[in-house]
Amino acid sequence: MSKKLRLGIIGAGNMGSKHINNNLAGKCPEIEVTAVADRDPSKLERVRTALENARTSGADIPDMVCYSEGSELISDRTCDAVLIAVPHYQHPGLSVEAMRAGLHVMCEKPAGVYTLDVRRMIEEADRHLELVFGMMFNQRTNHVYRKMKEIIDSGELGAIRRTSWIVTSWYRPQFYYDSGDWRATWSGEGGGVLLNQCPHQLDLWQWICGMPSKIDAKMYFGKWHDIEVEDDVSVFCEYPNGATGTFITSTGDVPGTNRFEIVCDGGTLLTDSKKLWLTKLEVPESVFTKQNRTAAFGAPKSEKTEVQTDGENPQHVGVLNAFAGAVLHGTTLVADGREGINGLMISNAMHLSAWLGHEITLPFDEQLFYDKLMEHVAASKAKTSFAGSVVSDTEGTY
C-alpha cells in the first residue's frame, strides 16, 4: 500500500466536518485523518459517530484521536500535517505553532483577520521551506475561473479596462449568525461578509485581474441582520494601469446574483460562476477609435460565444488532494499559503476606507488598520441571541 498523509483537523464545525466527511467517503485517497481537535465535546462526539457509521458501511478507516485543543493535537505527533478550520483569529497562531512543530499546514480561508498577523505566519513559513503551506482557496479549482485566468494571462484580450463583480448570492438568515457565539462579532470573527463569505471572490479577483492600487468603500454594519459587522458592501477601486473596478456584496439579498465581468481592450469576459461567455472585438477598441473616421456612432464588430472549459470543479477535495500530492510527491498546490495575504489586504483596505470615510491607497498603514480593528473589538458585545453550537450542512455553499 502506498504511503498516505496523516492529517489532523483542528476545528470540527461546519467546514471541519465537511473535510472529515469527504475523507470518510474516500474522496481523498492519499489522506487519512488520524486526529481531530475541537473545544466542543458534542462536535467530537459527532465525529466519532460519523467514523463508526463509515466503518459500519464497510470502510477501512483508522482510529481518529480526539483532542479538546489544537495545541494538544499539534504537540502529540499523531499526524504529519494539519488542516486549520477554526475561527479566523486563530488561523495564524495555530499555523505558526504547527510549522514550529514540523507539520505541514493547510489553512482554511481567510488567512487571518489582519495582515500584520498573517505576515507573521508567512515569515514562519519562509523559515521552514521543507514544509508545505497551503491555503484552502477551493474556488481556484472552478473550471470557469481557471479559464478566465488563462485567457487574461495570455494577453489575447489586451489590457484590462474595467472589472465588476456583484456577488450577492450569500443570503444568510438571522439563525445563521445566532448559530455561533463568535459569528459576526468584531471580537470573535473580525468582520462580516468580506471576511467570512467573500475571501474566495477577493482572492479570485486579484488572482485573475491583479491587485488594485486604490480602494474606496461604503459599507453598512448590521443593515439586514442583528449583528455588529458588515452585511452590505459597495466598493470602487483603481488599478495601477488606470483600469477601474467595482465589487458589491451582501448577505441580505434573496436570491441574489453572482456576476463577474472583465472588460478588456479587445473584448469582454462574463460569468455567472457556471458558464463563461466571451465577446471578442474584431479589432481592439484602442485601434478602432483611432482608425474610424467615418461613423460618429460606430463601434467595433464583435462576436459573443460561450467559452468551452474542461468542466472540472473538484473544490475542497481538489485542494486537499493537491496538498497531499505536494507533501508526498512534490507536485503543485492549488494555492500557496503565502498568497492568502493578497485578498485579506484588499478586505482590510475596504474596512479601513469605510471606517475613515475616504479612499485608501495600497499598500496602506497596516498598524493603523490594526488599531482601528482593536477599537471595534473593545466595543464588541457578547451575544444575547446565541442559539447554541450548531453544525450545519455546507453543501451548495462556497
Image: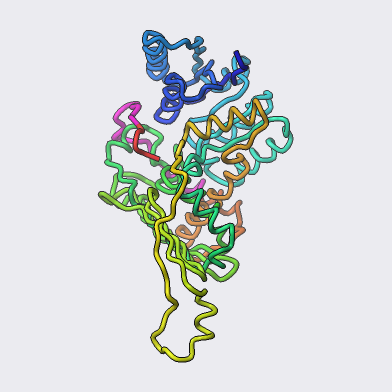
State the image coordinates of residue 93 (x, y, percent, origin top left): 59, 33
Q: Which residues are magenta?
A: 373-393
Residue at x 58%, y 54% (from the top left corner): 368
State the image coordinates of residue 118 (x, y, percent, origin top left): 60, 42
Q: In this figure, what is the number of numbered marks?
A: 0
Residue 168 in magenta?
no
Q: Nearer the viewer, residue 241 or 214?
A: 241
Give the quadrant of the N terminus: top right
Task: Name the quadrant containing residue 76.
Answer: top right
Give the quadrant of the C terminus: top left
Main SS of the magenta part reads loop
Q: Is residue 191 left or right of residue 32?
A: left
State the image coordinates of residue 54 (x, y, percent, origin top left): 39, 13
Q: Is residue 64 left or right of residue 154?
A: left
Q: Is residue 191 above or below residue 124?
A: below
Q: Nearer the viewer, residue 305 or 128?
A: 305
- Is residue 91 something one can see in this rendering? yes
Residue 386 in magenta?
yes
- Is residue 377 something one can see in this rendering? no
State the image coordinates of residue 6 (x, y, percent, origin top left): 58, 19
Residue at x 57%, y 33% (from the top left corner): 322
Q: Is residue 276 above or below residue 299?
A: above
